[in-house]
Image: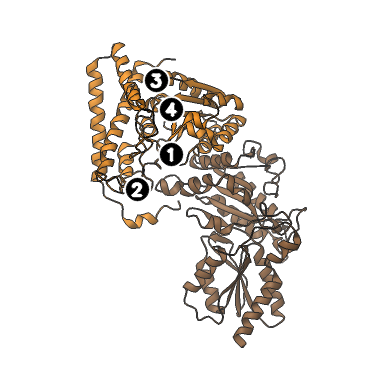
Amino acid sequence: MPPSLEVRLWMYTNMVKSRRYEEAIKLAYLEGKRPLFNMAKGPIPGEMHLSSGQEPCAVGVCAHLRAEDAVTATHRPHHIAIAKGVDLNGMTAEIFGKRDGLSGGRGGHMHLFDPTVNFCCSGIVAQGMGPAVGAGLAAKLRARDGVAVSFIGEGAANQGAFHESLNLAAVWNVPVIFVIEDNAWGISVAKESSTAISRNSERAAAYGMAGWFVPDNDADEIYAVAGAAVERARSGHGPSLIEIQTSRLEGHFMGDAEGYRPKGEVQALWARDPIVSYRQRLVESGVDDARLGRIEREQQVAVDAAFAFARASNYPEPQSALQTVFA
Amino acid sequence: MSVTKRRLTIAKAMSEAIAAAMDKDPSVLVLGEDIGRLGGVFGTTQGLLDRFGADRVRDTPISETAFIGAAVGLAASGMRPIVELMFVDFFGVCMDAIYNLAAKQSYFSGGRVPCPMVLMTSVGGGYGDAGQHSQCLYATFAHLPGLKVVMPSNSHDAKGLMLSAIADPNPVVFMFHKALQGMGWLGTVPGSIVHVPVEDYTVPIGRAQVAKPGQDITLVGVGITVHYALEAANSLAAEGIDAEVLDLRTIAPLDRDAIAASVRKTRRLIVVDDDYTSFGLSAEVMASAVECSVDWLSTPSRLAYPDVPVPFSPALEHPLLPSASKICERVRSLLRRRAA
């Protein structure tokens, strides 16, 4: 089913919010890291994996989810967290390592947990898949129609956890949707040099589950496919695998020189920026340009407010590092 | 008044505890390889499938990464999964779910997402299964913050520790020693089969217990090494040596107070450990002992499995394991050194 105008505006809003967020992260991340890049410096230290270009995957899938549906995300989690409704202030303060962060600065950008919307992520490739099967199983055992979604990159499809989790979900008929965001690169290794088949969605057949391939990084198409997968899961028809050909507009992490990318690839990807084309389509379908402009301004304000909140928050007491090891 | 004794194996005591918890709390479920119809290769889930059905007693494919990962997801969703890793030696195929996910869920969520799960797993050798099915690896797990690690030496403690582990809001690695388990096809140390009350009770996690009080020397063990120590203490008593045996029961968090209390009294210590010698449980117990101020009568000492993989041939393996006679020899030599 194609998305309603309301859904399309929700998706546009969240894609814009996510992109503005990554732009703000990029600026804050580079503070203190120029002219000499040192990952440990500045208000946001550590690795930083930006999701710019992958926003359609997050909104197209999360538009179908409720707060109680569980999502496990990857080391590149911001767009998904935003689309799932993770508290933006808490998330930003967490990324800044502040006291008011989601976990008081213990997790940082790769380990975001927001139980109010059942979102979590982990920095180890493919390892969110098993937990998603468990979350789906929990919903099933309680006879609720909740689902779980595990977002992974295309590199995760070559991990043992991928194959074990698909098989387990299928053999237990668990309401879980595995979403591959195929951005074509596992850090510097191109998908075609790491993956024996060109379409990972075909691997679904090996586990007797539905597999979909979405070629266009298009929020409406992703929405349609994810809708079918979520509906299958909610109605007791079990797991699905969705592969989306998306784009990584930035490096693997901030500071990545990207010498491995073919000349012109990044520029070509930016020329097909999925948010720009989505906006165009909305305008062509009759949405007032001014309305979209208002959405863009509002989201910039929301992002700015979250960053102001994070910067104003204090650093946690050193003593708090010793707390919450155990519940 | 006579009390009817219910002498159960550790396997039966574990199943009984799990059944009791499942009875009370619908969020408790069990998953693992061969835990359904078979009742667990080591008898940990006997009778559960018939009683609770296949939804809550789930045989899994041989996919430890996926099903231990699933247990973490179940725990994050408010369920209380008990998951079996058939042999601790298999942790190599699924450790991320254990130490990066389960152990860090509370911490990385600032305490907002607890991980109430039990990972039960068999340990120990001595029956000719060689080095991929005979390891203990106590310290491998106890080293990692966010995990609790327990191991009973008898069926009474097995039931009480299991009920504590299931009730705990944190991941608890419940180790059980194959030589104590009470399987018909695997020799069992008789001392592990003791009276188990019918009613529910808990053995607190983090508390050691004096298995035999004594004045002259402290022998610290856990699981099977408690039985070696008790046997040694019994022999030594005939020579007029009064050994105290401390059963750790919990490996992490270690009951350092109990260790300190015992060595302050005896001022002599031997740690007995069937895990590898270096960087392990024996070193941690000794560190705890020397960190408290004791006027030692003899240097603290350890008797542990040497730093080699477990060989197959009994002719090779058995001489490497700790034993009651080795403990006796070590005790005598420590006491002689003092006298000399």
Q: Is residue A217 above or below residue A91?
A: above
Instruction: Quote the CA–CA distance across marks 2 and 4.
Output: 27 Å
Tell which tag, 2 or 4, sits nearer the viewer: 2
* Residue tagged 4: A65
Disc 3 element: loop
Which amino acid does the dot numbered 1 rest on? Cys
Colour of chain B in the image: brown
Q: From the viewer's perspective, is B175 left or right of B115?
A: right
Disc 2 element: loop
Disc 4 element: loop
Colour of chain A in the image: orange
* Residue tagged 3: A218
Which amino acid does the dot numbered 3 rest on? Asp
Identify which residue, A207 or B84, lies in the foreground.
Answer: A207
Any mark on residue A121, and which?
Answer: 1
* Residue tagged 2: A105
Judging from the image, mark 1 belongs to the subunit labelled A
Residue at x 64%, y 37% (from the top left corner): B61
- Residue B103 spot, x, y in % from top left: 49, 49
Q: Between disc 1 and disc 3, whose residue precedes? A: 1
Assess disc 3: are there few (<14), some (14-19) or many (≥20) residues with their C-alpha within 10 Å of its C-alpha.
Answer: many
Instruction: Quote the CA–CA distance across marks 2 and 1.
Output: 15 Å
